[in-house]
Amino acid sequence: MLYTKQGSCRLYWNRELGWVIEVPTALTQEQLHRIARWALPKQVDRWRNLPPGNKKDELGHAIEHLKQGRILQRLIDHDGDGVFVPFASTERATTRRYLYG
């Protein structure tokens, strides 16, 4: 896997899925394209410095995906264990009892 980390987001290459970014909240398509433009020169530099072989070939394939802006999003929670509950309440629920009349 190839990793690039920026802030709380992690961008990596997965052979089956392609480029995957782990984020706490969903990103727009424009944001994904900006991330691709940010990561592209770094990956090209890595590709130039690799000796010929399988790793260089795979990174070349990954760079082609990055040029197209093809990045999948994986939502993660704040502690990074990969479990994300999108509609969970942040406040504890209390039982309220109402007496009528």
Image (tube, helix red, strand yellow):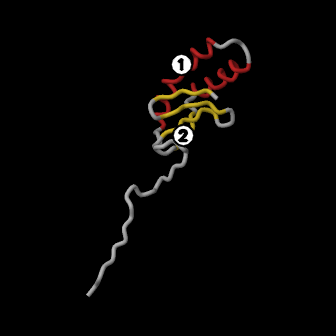
User: In the depicted view, which residue is nearer to us: 65 or 14?
Assistant: 14
Q: Residue at x 62, y 12 (%)?
A: 48
Quote the CA–CA distance across marks 2 and 1. 20 Å
User: In the depicted view, which residue is nearer to us: 88 or 13?
Assistant: 88
Kindly identify the amino acid type of the residue bearing the numbered disc 1: Lys
Q: Which residue is mark 2?
A: 73
Give the x, y percent position of residue 75.
Answer: 52, 44
Count residues near mark 1 (Cα–Cα under 10 Å), then give few for <14, some for 14-19, many for 20+.
few
User: In the depicted view, which residue is nearer to us: 34 or 25?
Assistant: 25
| Label ID, residue 42 | 1
Q: Is residue 3 left or right of residue 35?
A: right
| Label ID, residue 91 | none
Q: Residue at x 63, y 33 (%)?
A: 18
Give the x, y percent position of residue 5.
Answer: 51, 28
| Mark 2 or mark 1: whose residue is earlier in sequence | 1
Count residues near mark 2 (Cα–Cα under 10 Å), then give few for <14, some for 14-19, many for 20+.
some
Q: Residue at x 54, y 31 (%)?
A: 11
In the image, residue 25 sits, relative to residue 48, either above or below, namely below
Viewport quadrant of the N terminus = top right
Q: Is residue 96 left or right of residue 37?
A: left
Q: Residue at x 48, y 37 (%)?
A: 29
Where residue 51 sits, quadrant-wise, is top right
- Residue furthest bottom in the image: 101
